[in-house]
Each structure stands twice: as structure tokens, then as C-alpha cells.
């Protein structure tokens, strides 16, 4: 087994950016009961009962796919990584702009 690294950064309530050894890995939206994770591996929805360890996860990107057998999954496309990083960076810039405008409005009072 090799070394693993995982870091999750909360940017707003209910929105997290997740990082691993290779950099940005995914984005998560949602709370304790229901969350959606978007990564280069696809989209996953998770419904859970907090404090019990019980959860149910669906692979939304595979629903209705022509290859439903998880043992015969195709590898993730390597071209999806840069696009995901670009979307995350744009999201962070928009959120920083919104926060900056909010601070300016608050200070102008």
C-alpha cells in the first residue's frame, strides 16, 4: 500500500471541493442527509441516515448506460480532469466575487 492524501475544503455551506495527491479530484454539493459528488469518475448521489453509518449510493452517470455491469466498466476519460479543474476554478472565482461584493455593500452602509 502506498501513501494516500485527501483534503476537503468547505467553500460555502453545503459546497465542498475535494483534493487528493494529484490535485483537485471532485466537488460535493449537499448536506448530511443527501449529497451529490461530481468527479472524473462520474456523478454519484448519496442518501444517508446521519449517525448510523447507513447510506445508499447511486451512480447517476451510469444510469441507463449501455454497459450496466460494474465489473466491465470502461476507464474514466483522462480528458475530463482538466475540464473539471477549470469548472472548479471558475466556481471559486465567482464565489469570491460574490463575497467581495457582499463585503463592499456591508462596508458602504
Image: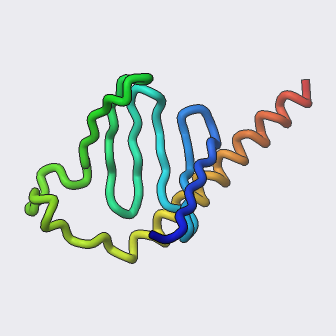
Tell me where residue 82 appears, x and y as whole percent.
49, 72
Figure quadrant of the N terminus: bottom left
Instruction: Name the residue located 74 percent from the left edge and 39 percent from the top edge.
Output: 99
Instruction: Name the residue located 20 percent from the left edge and 71 percent from the top edge.
Output: 74
Between 76 and 98, the one nearer to me in the picture:
76
Instruction: Name the residue located 12 percent from the left edge and 51 percent from the top edge.
Output: 64
Please indicate whether residue 70 sits to the left or right of residue 44 in the image: left
Tell me where residue 61 appears, x and y as whole percent.
25, 53
Examine the rendered structure and indicate whether residue 91 appears above or below residue 12.
below
Examine the rendered structure and indicate whether residue 29 appears above or below residue 72.
above
Instruction: Name the residue located 17 percent from the left edge and 49 percent from the top edge.
Output: 63
Between 1 and 23, the one nearer to me in the picture:
1
Figure quadrant of the C terminus: top right
Tell me where residue 45 appears, x and y as whole percent.
32, 40
Tell me where residue 40 appears, x and y as whole percent.
38, 63
Residue 5 in view of the camera: yes
Between 26 and 70, the one nearer to me in the picture:
70
Examine the rendered structure and indicate whether residue 67 appears above or below residue 51.
below
Q: How is the image coloured?
A: rainbow
Please indicate whether residue 100 sits to the left or right of residue 36 in the image: right
Please indicate whether residue 43 sits to the left or right of residue 86 in the image: left
Amino acid at each position: 500500500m502506498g501513501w494516500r492524501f485527501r483534503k476537503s475544503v468547505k467553500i460555502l455551506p453545503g459546497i465542498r471541493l475535494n483534493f487528493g495527491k494529484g490535485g483537485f479530484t471532485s466537488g460535493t454539493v449537499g448536506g448530511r442527509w443527501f449529497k451529490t459528488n461530481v468527479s472524473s469518475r462520474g456523478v454519484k448521489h448519496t442518501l444517508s441516515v446521519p449517525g448510523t453509518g447507513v447510506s445508499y449510493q447511486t451512480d447517476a452517470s451510469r444510469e441507463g448506460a449501455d454497459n450496466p455491469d460494474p465489473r466491465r466498466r470502461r476507464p474514466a476519460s483522462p480528458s475530463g480532469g482538466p475540464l473539471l479543474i477549470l469548472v472548479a476554478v471558475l466556481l471559486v472565482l465567482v464565489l469570491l466575487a460574490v463575497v467581495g461584493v457582499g463585503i463592499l455593500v456591508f462596508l458602504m452602509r
